[in-house]
């Protein structure tokens, strides 16, 4: 199992264990081939629907679950909700084709660890899986933009003003950390850029979550992008 060093923020395990959940066999085969080419990723299970996914995850205890949205019996959103209720620390990365914005937003509110487009280049898919396994939120820039546009029906200027007012509650250093999260940086990368420790970054993140307020790193990233402060 992949673990993260609490001092350096680097991955210390040998492999990232992954479960693939998609009702299309060809998609699962393609993902298995892509991920299998990386010796530090181990695909430990597959499922063709959300209900089966719950059993596979319980049996294999993966580091990352790649979860499709539209599936029979139990869709990816409902499966994610059940999975995170059972295992709050599970890292679920949603697979999307961009035609289900409301479902993606629902998964975001549930605490999904990231979003991955099915046409993402293979190298980027591998990076997303490693990032999720290391405890980082993985947001494709295009997904972030689409999500921000869907969060509210208020005019763009009004959204930007509201987001900037929320960020005004932060100290300058907290704002630096929030910007780093908005750019998809890990705690270790943020610490290196700002010349502070990973522990200090985590402390700042806790304060940011309280002040905005926000439920998770993804919500911080959305606020930063809405404010145009990346």
Image: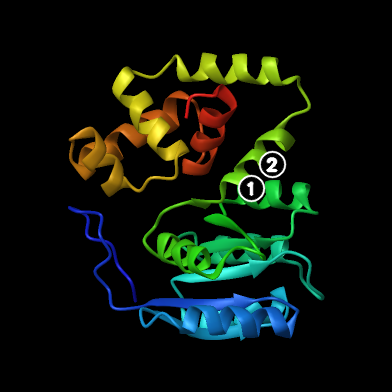
Mark 1 neighbour density, 10 Å: few (under 14) some (14–19) many (20 or more)? some
Residue 177's mark? none
Task: Name the residue carrying label 2.
Answer: 146
**Left or right: 35 as drawn, with respect to 186:** right
x%, y% of residue 35?
49, 78
Count numbered badges in the picture.
Answer: 2
Callout 2 touching callout 1 (CB < 8 Å)? yes
* Residue at 51%, 39% in the rendered image: 215
Secondary element at image label 1: helix
Quarter residue 223 falls in: top right
Residue at image coords 18%, 41%:
197
42 relative position to 191: left or right: right
Between 91 and 37, the one nearer to me in the picture: 37
Give the image location of residue 132, x and y in percent. 45, 61
Residue neighbourhood size for the residue with mark 2, other residues' Cα within 10 Å, grouped as few (<14), some (14–19), many (≥20): few
**Quarter of the picture holding the N terminus:** bottom left
Expressed as whole percent of the image width and height from the top left, the position of residue 211 reads 44, 24
Residue 96 to residue 111: above or below: below
- Which residue in the protein does label 1 denote? 143
208 lies above or below 93 = above
């Amino acid at each position: 199992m992949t673990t993260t060093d609490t001092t350096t923020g680097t991955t210390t395990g040998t492999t990232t264990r992954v479960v693939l959940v998609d009702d299309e066999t060809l998609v699962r085969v393609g993902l298995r081939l892509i991920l299998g080419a990386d010796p530090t990723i181990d695909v430990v299970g597959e499922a063709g629907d959300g209900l089966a996914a719950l059993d596979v995850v319980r049996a294999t205890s993966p580091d990352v679950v790649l979860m499709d949205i539209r599936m029979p019996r139990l869709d990816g959103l409902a499966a994610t909700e059940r999975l995170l209720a059972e295992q709050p620390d599970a890292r679920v990365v949603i697979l999307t084709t961009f035609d289900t914005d409301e479902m993606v937003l629902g998964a975001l509110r549930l605490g999904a660890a990231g979003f991955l487009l099915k046409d993402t280049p293979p190298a980027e898919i591998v990076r997303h899986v490693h990032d999720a396994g290391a405890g980082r939120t993985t947001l494709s820039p295009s997904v972030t933009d689409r999500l921000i546009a869907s969060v509210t029906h208020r005019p763009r200027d009004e959204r930007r003003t509201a987001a900037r007012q929320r960020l005004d509650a932060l100290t300058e250093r907290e704002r630096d950390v929030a910007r780093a999260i908005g750019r998809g940086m890990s705690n270790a990368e943020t610490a290196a850029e700002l010349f502070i420790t990973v522990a200090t970054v985590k402390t700042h993140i806790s304060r940011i979550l309280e002040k905005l307020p926000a439920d998770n790193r993804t919500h911080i990233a959305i606020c930063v992008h809405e404010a145009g402060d990346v």
